[in-house]
Amino acid sequence: MAESIFDGALSRMNDASKYTTVKQSTLDRLAHAERELTVSFPVRMDSGELKTFTGYRVLHSSIRGPGKGGIRFHPDSSLDEVRALAFWMAFKCAVVNIPLGGAKGGVICNPKELSKTELEKISREYVRAIYDVMGPDKDIPAPDVYTTPTVMAWMEDEFSKIARGNYPATITGKPVSLGGSLGRSDATGTGGFYTAAEAIKALGKDMKTATVAVQGFGNAGYHFARLMHSAGATIVAVSDSKGGIYSKEGLDPDKILNAKKQAGSVTAFNNATMMTNEELLELDVDILAPAALEDVITTANANKINAKIIIELANGPVSPDADRIIDEKGILVVPDILANAGGVTVSYFEWVQNRTGERWTLEKVQKRLKEIMVAEFKELHMLSEEKKISMRLAAYVLGLKRIAEAFEAKTG
Ligand code: GLU
């Protein structure tokens, strides 16, 4: 595996650069983040103990617009990971062609072990710590792993209090009552669904006979499974951090969600066979959707992947050194920087609505999202066929060209 997640991310950009005429000085610029902020802040826990937390906010680039990207609350968050995630955001925004740059944040904490009060204090303290770099024209955070619309509401409230004003456009993924966009909460899964439908068509397959395995049953994984299920596909397996479940006849995502809500894990669902996350990834299915964290498919298991299509709902689920093995197996990978870009696309719609004082209907949001996801899928698919490269490489070529064009327009 690559030394660091960020180095792995860069290796894909460098591979893609061979298919472009991008200048070396542009690649050098993109190999570095514009700004990296590490913050620490004390929080009074419910027990009375004062505990210090560490967080990050990295702006990879504001070349195509203000920084955009989520904030992750996770015990394993690190500067290297956040740096890679910010880089991916820059490419993601370029691939769906929205006028935003790339950024990301993280706080090292375990929300599963925190009370609601503690979570609120961490959210507010984090904003106080990064306040100077946030703003509707500077850097606009959003939800990511283990952060929710409620966390965004606390963060927006804290920002607006410090700024002594009302700044809804400073953060997206807010509750609808606070200026959040309709269709944002399920946007990542919905965008992934649109790309899966296109990938199925591209391979001459049929949604109604497609089998699907989803690794990770959080926001993105659940909505993706729900939409695939209602379109007629069979969800044969789902999993979360505690393990997975399998049923040849198919699982109903809403019933699984109920079991997860009641008992904390999909493994609490009774009418299915237990399965590990590793086994789920190796299933012989039409579609595999890794929807949790980075590096779940590596050189250690890439040879054992049997899916026909991989929809990368997570960021970075396939490690760069496993790409070649997956390509050689003929698996069609819809890369993360397109497959999960529905989230940031609707975040962009939210930001536009907040800035113009408009409220879009759900129909308008979904129509625009579908147009973008389908158009960019087709563009990448065409590029990959034309240049005989993977869709991932095609996505990096397209993203790099768009970022480089803006950078080179500024720098001459
Ligand atoms: N966290 C999501 C992502 O990785 C959404 C980011 C956003 O909406 O700004 O794309």
Image (tube, rainbow, N blue to C red):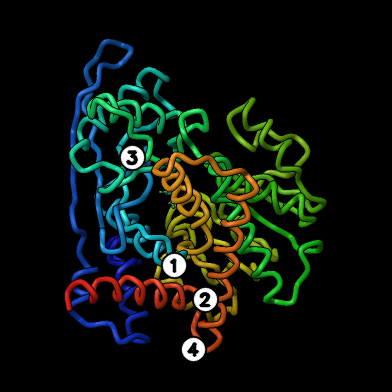
The residue indicated by pointer 4 is 387
Of callouts 1 and 2, the N-terminal one: 1
Residue 345 place in picture, x, y as percent: 48, 54
The residue indicated by pointer 2 is 380
Q: How many marks?
A: 4
- Helix, strand or loop status at disc 3: helix
Of callouts 3 and 1, the N-terminal one: 1
Crowd class of label 2 (few under 14; some 14 to 19; many from 20; radius 10 Å): many
Of callouts 3 and 2, the N-terminal one: 3
Camera-side mark, 3 or 4: 3
The amino acid type of the residue labelled 1 equals Val
179 left or right of 29? right
348 left or right of 251? left
Q: Are marks 3 and 1 in contact (CB under 8 Å)?
A: no
- Tag shown at residue 170: 3
The amino acid type of the residue labelled 2 equals Leu
144 left or right of 109? right
- Tag shown at residue 95: 1
- Helix, strand or loop status at disc 4: helix
Residue at image coords 64%, 67%: 307
Q: Quadrant of residue 408?
A: bottom left
Work out how far the residue at label 3 is from the one at label 1, CA to CA, in angstroms.
23 Å
